[in-house]
Image: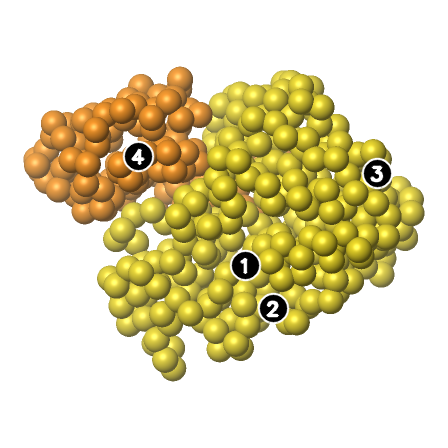
Chain colours: A orange, B yellow
């Protein structure tokens, strides 16, 4: 789908709308992130990976499936960079590809229980598959 | 006062208590929640990508429906509220989204973000008023120590949600106080419960929930309230720490207003137990 790293970098900028140059690397996003310890690439590093043209690494990162979209990083960023939008864009670049889905309807029956709210299924399909 | 009301998918299924106690309480407080006809699921998460339009259209349809009726739009579920408020902000401020959504939907006149979106709690605070609410309380929840669990979606991003102070909110504590109970303030009340991660990554959700529960209980909370069906599910079913009972904020509201049968009220029991106890007694609500 993407032939070069330049194409990927252009795409992540287009989908996210994030201006990575605004980041002053204070690390407040990662300090605020409740999933920080689970991530192989941390929220503040997403900006650096995009800047250095290594979006492929972001697309392979397990952080894409650990982000909770809690918006703590968005709220607390003093430069309004919105790291969550970069993570979302990288996730979309994966699941928008054929075979890139992280959740299949076939998996759902065994994940269900009596109390599981519809909201959880709706949210998961929006986040994990196209 | 009549408000357009967007219940959302979960309030029609697993979170029926959140819905019915809200409707009952609204009538007792002098306003009506008029459900929008043919509303569609909001998608449960706000589409963050700037190139996604289709996933925002169901929210725009609901917003336009309220506009055509000349009503404010009230939501209860934190997710619905988050999605609809943010899409409304897009329709008001982001020209590309506004143009493309309107080109697709072709309403009689373009929707430009005119509708006022209110969470049920905002109606209580800003329209009814917590002082008036306090006067209408028939059975004060005296002696109850209740922790408000805000989670993420009501508060953040505060520039758009404009719901309360995102780091030190007070609306739910003021609500609890108005009902005659004692609010318990604890540090993790606006930290994430794990959200949708609990479908595929239960251990991670468990870690989040344990921090919230330990924080609440250590600070003296004996029960928690939330507005979000997914928060309620995660808080009840994830994690290994000891648990305080979790209910919807509309349930303690209905209880304090004296709208629940005596046998179902109080005690902070999980709703399943209460429903069993009150069997037959709640058929008319």
Residue B262 visible in image: yes
Q: Are marks 4 and 3 in contact (CB under 8 Å)?
A: no
The x and y percentages for residue B194 are: 50, 31
How far is mark 2 from mark 3, CA to CA? Answer: 31 Å
Quadrant hosting residue B176: top right
Q: Residues within 10 Å of mark 4 (few under 14, many from 20)?
A: some
In the rendered image, the quadrant that contains the C terminus of chain B is bottom right
**Residue A78: numbered disc:** 4
Secondary element at tag 3: loop
The x and y percentages for residue A34 are: 44, 25
- In terms of depth relative to the viewer, which is nearer, B31 or A79? A79
Q: Which residue is mark 2?
A: B3
Q: Residue at x 50, y 57 (%)?
A: B41
**Residue B142: numbered disc:** 3
How far is mark 2 from mark 4, CA to CA? Answer: 37 Å
The chain identifier of the residue carrying mark 4 reads A
Quadrant hosting residue B1: bottom right
The x and y percentages for residue B163 are: 51, 49
The x and y percentages for residue A73 are: 36, 33
Secondary element at tag 4: loop
Q: Are marks 2 and 1 in contact (CB under 8 Å)?
A: yes
Please, is residue A35 above or below residue B118 in the view?
above
Secondary element at tag 2: strand
Say whether disc 2 or disc 1 marks the residue closer to the N-terminus: 2
């Amino acid at each position: 789908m993407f032939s070069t790293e330049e194409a990927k970098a252009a795409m992540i900028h287009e989908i996210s709308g994030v201006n990575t140059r605004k980041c002053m690397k204070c690390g407040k996003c990662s300090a605020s992130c409740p999933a920080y310890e689970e991530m192989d690439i941390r929220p503040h590093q997403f900006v650096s990976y995009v800047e250095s043209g290594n979006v492929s690494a972001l697309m392979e990162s397990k952080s894409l499936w650990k982000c909770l979209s809690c918006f703590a990083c968005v709220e607390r960023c003093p430069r309004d960079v919105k790291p969550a939008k970069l993570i979302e864009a990288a996730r979309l670049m994966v699941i928008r590809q054929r075979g890139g889905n992280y959740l299949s309807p076939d998996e759902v029956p065994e994940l269900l229980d009596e109390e599981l709210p519809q909201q959880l299924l709706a949210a998961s399909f929006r986040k994990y598959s196209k | 006062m009549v408000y357009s009301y967007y219940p959302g998918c979960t309030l029609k299924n697993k979170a029926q208590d959140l819905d019915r106690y809200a409707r009952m309480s609204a009538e007792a407080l002098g306003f009506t929640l008029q459900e929008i006809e043919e509303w569609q699921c909001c998608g449960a998460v706000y589409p963050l990508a700037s190139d996604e339009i289709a996933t925002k259209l169901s929210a725009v349809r609901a917003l336009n429906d309220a506009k055509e009726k000349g009503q404010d739009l009230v939501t209860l579920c934190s997710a619905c509220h988050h999605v609809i408020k943010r899409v409304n902000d897009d329709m008001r401020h982001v020209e590309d989204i506004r143009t493309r959504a309107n080109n697709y939907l072709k309403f009689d006149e373009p929707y430009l973000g005119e509708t006022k979106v209110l969470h049920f709690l905002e109606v209580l605070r800003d329209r009814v008023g917590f002082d008036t609410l306090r006067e209408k309380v028939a059975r004060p929840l005296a002696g109850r120590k209740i922790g408000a669990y805000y989670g993420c979606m009501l508060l953040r991003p505060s520039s758009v949600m404009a719901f309360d102070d995102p780091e030190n909110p007070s609306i739910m504590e003021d609500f609890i106080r108005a009902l005659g109970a004692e609010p318990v303030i604890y540090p993790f009340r606006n930290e994430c419960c794990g959200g949708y991660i609990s479908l595929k990554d239960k251990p991670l959700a468990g870690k989040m929930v344990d921090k919230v529960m330990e924080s609440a209980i250590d600070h003296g909370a004996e029960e928690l309230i939330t507005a979000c069906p997914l928060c309620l599910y995660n808080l009840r079913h994830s994690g290994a720490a000891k648990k305080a009972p979790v209910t919807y904020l509309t349930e303690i509201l209905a209880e304090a207003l004296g709208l629940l049968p005596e046998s179902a009220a109080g005690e902070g029991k999980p709703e399943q137990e209460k429903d069993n106890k009150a069997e037959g007694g709640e058929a008319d609500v």
